[in-house]
Image: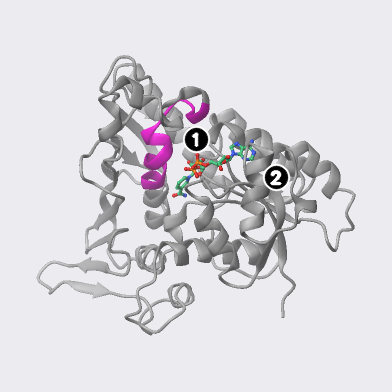
Amino acid sequence: MKKKIRLGFIGGGHNSLIGILHKISAYMHDRYEIVGGVFNSKYEDSLESAREIGITKDRIYKDVDDMIAVENEIPTESRIEAVCILTPNNSHFEIAKKFLENKYHIICEKPLTISLGEAKYLLSIKEKNNLVFAVTHTYTGYPMVRQMTKMISEGLIGNIQRVDSQYLQGWINPIIHEKKKRKSSWRLDPKISGISSCVADIGTHAFNMLELVTGLKVHKVLSDINSLYNDNPLDIDANILVRMNNGAKGVIRSSQIATGEENNLRVSIYGDKGYLKWQQENPNKLYFLKENEPIKVLKPGHEYNYPITLNSSKLPPGHPEGIFDAMGNIYLGAAKAIRGENFYDHEFPTIYEGVRGMDFIEKVIESHNRGNVWLELEK
Ligand SMILES: NC(=O)c1ccc[n+]([C@@H]2O[C@H](COP(=O)([O-])OP(=O)(O)OC[C@H]3O[C@@H](n4cnc5c(N)ncnc54)[C@H](O)[C@@H]3O)[C@@H](O)[C@H]2O)c1
């Protein structure tokens, strides 16, 4: 049996939204063991989080500095090797920087940081110290997203001529219209969320998905964002025109006030020979359309899929797998990289995608603030 990677958690405690997804996914392929960390901002809560999952008190730390000081003294064969950062956006940079400087591999939530400058700085330390740095764009782990990426790269829809990627949610609608309620979410607080709410939180997923599946880069953006109320400082809705680096045009839409929407991430790519469409609320179906042909619906687990797709599901066709499995696939890819094993292209999203995401957020907000102008992303 392969030796498990000793994993530390920062954030992701029992009261957090995303912690449970990471805990289950980390164990899914028997490649990691959670051995300690700082699960919550308050030590008592962190101890409670640890108790719930059977981690002993001696590897639960008061803060990141305490954790690094103690872990660095533990013999390498027992020391934490990789750290999973699941705190709100504004703390990712400081936490990741400290662990990278001390040579720990990183698995970090998106958005990577709250500025492009910070993101690039993390990239420079990661490269200098030759570490693995995954950024958990969860949806890239779905088998049919991987199938779509490969089909497009093999030319099955021809030259891409139009792109359309969206992530629509409605959860802010019930809190945005009352001043008091608006203060209840850190996602609307610029000190914690950064310069953006909606684009940083979910627009980045739509952007990442677009660049992943097309294999192209977004060259320019022109955005029109909405915050609904003057005292709400951050975007909660964004319509973004994009031009890709092959000249194709299209749109990225993201919203937290699309009333009634849940997690409606959808990516539609139109080539001159065909069209592929994938939607996360129906993730095991990939729609392939061509002129004058009946629609094809591809599903996981069938031999017609590419090896990376077949290796992204665990059960025979017809057994629905979902978001936990998608995140599990990302953890598996990162584990292979940490252990120096071969892995597929795009088996896990990296810090490079995290840096692209930060460039996207900054340009989208700047484009709107300068009067809806076209701005180029960095190459
Ligand atoms: N990949 C995805 O689809 C996805 C989905 C949801 C959230 N996220 C990202 O995950 C991150 C966390 O979001 P969330 O919704 O789980 O937040 P949350 O507010 O629900 O939970 C944050 C947790 O971090 C802990 N925490 C805060 N500061 C800490 C510190 N300095 N040290 C240790 N623990 C600390 C809190 O006690 C809490 O348990 C955000 O960056 C968010 O954008 C990603």
Instruction: Return the residue at label 1.
Output: 358
Marks 1/2: CA distance? 17 Å
**Horizontal arrangement in the rendering, residue 215 relative to residue 339 (left or right):** left
Specify whether tag 2 is near ligand 1 (CB below 8 Å): no
Residue 179: quadrant of the picture: top left
**Horizontal arrangement in the rendering, residue 324 relative to residue 172 (left or right):** right
Q: Residue at x 59, y 28 (%)?
A: 117
Q: Is 157 inside the magenta-drawn segment? A: no
Work out whether residue 363 or residue 137 is closer to the camera in this orientation and state it: 137
Instruction: Return the residue at label 2.
Output: 126
Identity, as a three-letter code, of the amino acid under mark 2? Lys
Q: Residue at x 27, y 18 (%)?
A: 229
Task: Assign a secondary structure to mark 1.
Answer: helix
Image location (x, y in percent) of residue 31: 65, 69
Residue 378 in view here? no
Identity, as a three-letter code, of the amino acid under mark 1? Met
The correct choice, above or below, for 227 with respect to 27 in the image is above
Work out whether residue 254 or residue 351 is closer to the camera in this orientation and state it: 254
Residue 108 in view here? yes
Residue 176: quadrant of the picture: top left
Image location (x, y in percent) of residue 91: 60, 33
The magenta span reads 192-207
Q: Which one is earlier in the sequence, the residue at label 1 or at label 2?
A: 2
The correct choice, above or below, for 200 with respect to 129 in the image is above
Q: Is 204 inside the magenta-drawn segment? A: yes
Quadrant in the picture for the N terminus:
bottom right
Image location (x, y in percent) of residue 336: 64, 67
Label 2, residues with CA under 10 Å away: few <14, some 14-19, many ≥20: many
